[in-house]
């Protein structure tokens, strides 16, 4: 048979693989983008730990659960390259993380575990508290450990953060991508979603076998996401599924989310983050956000810097 025939056959065999890789990239990007949204339906800035995490365990059944929860914490902090120190048996040492194992009668059935992050500015986590019911430790430990590191979203996809995870007792590849990106030297506390997205996307591209196809899928995702978020911020069209997915969004939350997204779009166009720099577009979005009461946008319009 001719060389041309074999070339065509080889190309035909490769085409489905390339399409699958592009689909995997697009789905992965969707999950990473959703990780930047709070379950209230509001887009968020990057928050993360800048110091060592010093954990103290309290509550019930610690002999039964502590090692497992500590293993989950160790897994996420190792991936993020953040030092974790257990000070449970050192009463004179100050902890900035408390993990409380509660009785099964505590908390709510629809929220068997929860993480509270304490930060004075939306950039650096100062303290945190994790609570989980003793009967739910197995399915909560890795999920809440991801939240602890500053990932506040509940994205739909292959992640332990999903409301319907495919795995609960260990991290999935996308979880590791999030953690490596969140704590990479390029990422800074306080970054907006459009500033953070390229860092997350580049980390995901690096895991893909076909970097060219992955890069093309990334660029398409950028364009589609910008278009969708501009429509959302302007109050046009349907509310994106990402806003409604948790079922906990409110009218006030959506209104606030639109104001925040207008500001974030202004930053994106001002800095050329995810989109090409366009000062006219930046000004338009800052003005829209400022008119909705967004103080950050108002400070942008008042003078240089943020």
Image: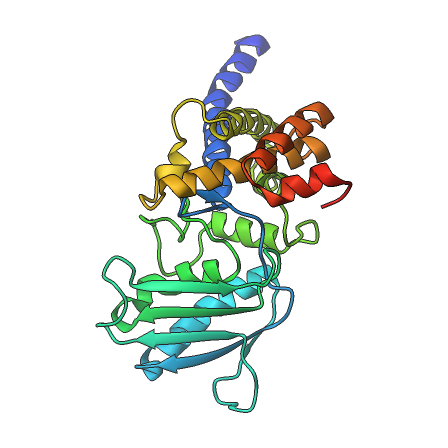
Frontmost residue, 16 versus 265: 265
Residue 137 against residue 265 in the figure, above or below: below
Q: Where is residue 134 drawn, in percent x and y?
A: 28, 73
The reply to whether residue 157 is visible in this rendering is: no
Q: Where is residue 277, by image quadrant?
A: top right
Residue positioned most to the right? 304
The reply to whether residue 120 is visible in this rendering is: yes
Q: Where is residue 58 drawn, in percent x and y?
A: 39, 81
Q: Where is residue 230 drawn, in percent x and y?
A: 53, 27
Q: Is residue 220 left or right of residue 40?
A: right
Q: Where is residue 98 drawn, in percent x and y?
A: 46, 75
Say which residue appears at 43% left-offset and 80% top-offset: 57
Say which residue appears at 66% left-offset and 37% top-offset: 267
Q: Is residue 231 left or right of residue 185?
A: left
Frontmost residue, 91 versus 280: 280
Q: Where is residue 295, by image quadrant?
A: top right
């Amino acid at each position: 048979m001719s060389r041309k025939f074999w070339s065509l056959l080889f190309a035909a065999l490769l085409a489905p693989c390339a399409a699958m890789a592009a689909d995997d990239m697009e789905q992965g990007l969707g999950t990473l983008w959703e990780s930047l949204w709070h379950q209230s339906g509001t887009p968020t800035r990057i928050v993360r730990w800048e110091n060592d995490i010093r954990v103290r365990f309290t509550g019930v059944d610690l002999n039964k659960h502590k090692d497992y929860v500590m293993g989950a914490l160790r897994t996420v902090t190792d991936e993020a390259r953040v030092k974790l120190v257990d000070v449970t048996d050192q009463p004179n040492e100050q902890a900035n993380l408390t993990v409380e194992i509660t009785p099964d009668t505590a908390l709510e059935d629809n929220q068997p575990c929860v993480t509270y992050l304490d930060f004075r500015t939306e950039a650096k986590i100062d303290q945190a508290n994790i609570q989980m019911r003793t009967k739910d430790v197995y399915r909560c430990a890795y999920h809440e450990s991801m939240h602890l590191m500053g990932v506040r979203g509940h994205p739909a996809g292959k992640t332990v953060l999903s409301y319907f995870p495919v795995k609960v007792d260990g991290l999935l590849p996308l979880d590791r991508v999030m953690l490596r990106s969140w704590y990479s030297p390029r990422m800074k506390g306080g970054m907006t979603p459009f500033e953070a997205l390229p860092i997350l996307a580049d980390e995901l591209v690096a895991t893909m076998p076909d970097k060219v196809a992955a890069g093309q899928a990334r660029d398409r995702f950028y364009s589609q996401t910008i278009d969708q978020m501009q429509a959302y911020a302007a109050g046009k069209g349907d509310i994106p599924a990402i806003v409604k997915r948790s079922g906990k969004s409110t009218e006030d939350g959506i209104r606030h989310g639109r104001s925040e997204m207008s500001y974030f779009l202004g930053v994106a166009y001002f800095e050329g983050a995810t989109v090409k720099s366009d000062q006219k577009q930046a000004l338009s979005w800052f003005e829209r956000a400022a008119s909705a009461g967004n103080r950050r946008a108002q400070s942008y319009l008042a003078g240089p810097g943020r």
